[in-house]
Image: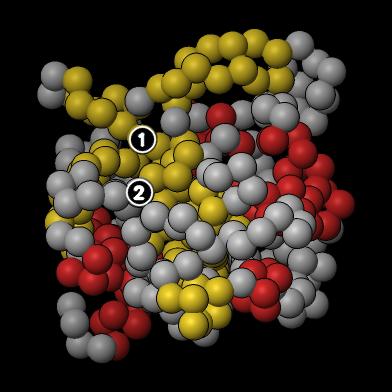
Amino acid sequence: MSGYRTGYAVVEETAKRNAEAQQAGNIFHAIEALRDIYWKNDGDKHIVRFLSDEIVTFPIHEAWKTVDGKYRNIACTAGFPDGDKLNRPCVICANYKNPFDSTKPATPRLVSLAIVLEQEKEGKKYIDSTRELELLSVAGDLNSPKSKGEQPIFGLVKQGNKFWNDVNGYYSEFDTTVDRPYSIIRRGVKKDTTYTIAALNEDTEFDTPQKLWDKYDIPEVEGFKDPIVGHIVKYLQKIGSQAWIDRWLGTGDGDPTTEFDHEDESDEDTVKPAVGSSLQDRLNAFKAKGNN
Ligand SMILES: [Zn+2]
């Protein structure tokens, strides 16, 4: 189970408030400032610590060039579940061309998302990477005092099946992915890309999702037993909200498909939109195929 449908009841208004608050830098916890974690070039490496054994599958228009020339993720709004307030026809699919082939419509990439901590090696240990963030002292109170300080970096990993099947190999070995960091290196380019994923030292002190959530004081998300899944869904609600789309697509400002120089991985996993997935489900599917 992914929890995506379970308790999924946040209205557009909330998503709009979240988008505005995060845009203005009004956040209470570092997990609300997710940094995209990606491996752009052959040999790129990240050390990550998974915070949950659940992943959420969703179609996203990744690294879409927005009105200020920067690249942002925009949810394919047709991917929200039927009956959800955010489920609606996608303006990008309907109105925009594929940035790499203007004879084709834009299509989202179906990715599975996880939130991780970014880590680094210090001596023989792995420690959290940090950055300076300014946080509100009271959740949701934009007038509460803010304080600046070093915070762990919460990253968003968005990858296709090949990547997650490799992670599943470790899941089947350890029964969890959260009990140790992983070193992940990209090999190759475009369609030949693979990832070398290495399990690092076991952390016997923090070896369950709950222990990590307590350690990092992860805020609960109403309706979700797994707060990491909740924060992924909140992120999807933000990048699929009308406020986000209006702000970053703008209106009538020329052809947004020009000068798109981001690498094309968009059709690697372009299949029917789906929600609700987990490592366990994937592992079972993997086993059913006789691949283990
Ligand atoms: Zn779309």
Indicate which disc residue 118 carries.
Answer: 1
Compared to residue 139, the image places residue 278 above or below, namely below
- Tell me which residue sits at (33%, 55%) in the image: 176
Residue 184 position in % (x across, y down): 22, 48
| Disc 2: CA contacts within 10 A as few (<14), some (14-19) or many (>=20) | some
Q: Which amino acid does label 2 sit on?
A: Tyr
The C terminus lies in quadrant: bottom left
Compared to residue 265, the image places residue 182 above or below, namely above
Q: How many marks?
A: 2
Q: What residue is pinned by disc 2?
A: 38
| Disc 1: CA contacts within 10 A as few (<14), some (14-19) or many (>=20) | many
In the foreground, 185 or 262: 262
Residue 122 position in % (x across, y down): 19, 20
Compared to residue 272, the image places residue 22 above or below, namely above
Q: Is residue 79 visible?
A: no
Q: Quadrant of residue 161?
A: bottom left
What SS does tag 1 mark? strand
Q: Is residue 36 visible?
A: yes
As measured in the structure, the alpha-carbon distance from the residue carrying label 2 to the one carrying label 1 is: 11 Å
The nearer-to-camera label among 2 and 1 is 2
Question: Going by the image, does 105 lie left or right of 248?
Answer: left
- Tell me which residue sits at (45%, 26%) in the image: 152
Question: Going by the image, does 217 lie left or right of 191?
Answer: right
- Tell me which residue sits at (21%, 44%) in the image: 44
Q: Earlier in the sequence, mark 2 or mark 1?
A: 2
In the image, the residue with mark 2 has its CB under 8 Å from the nearest atom of ligand 1: no
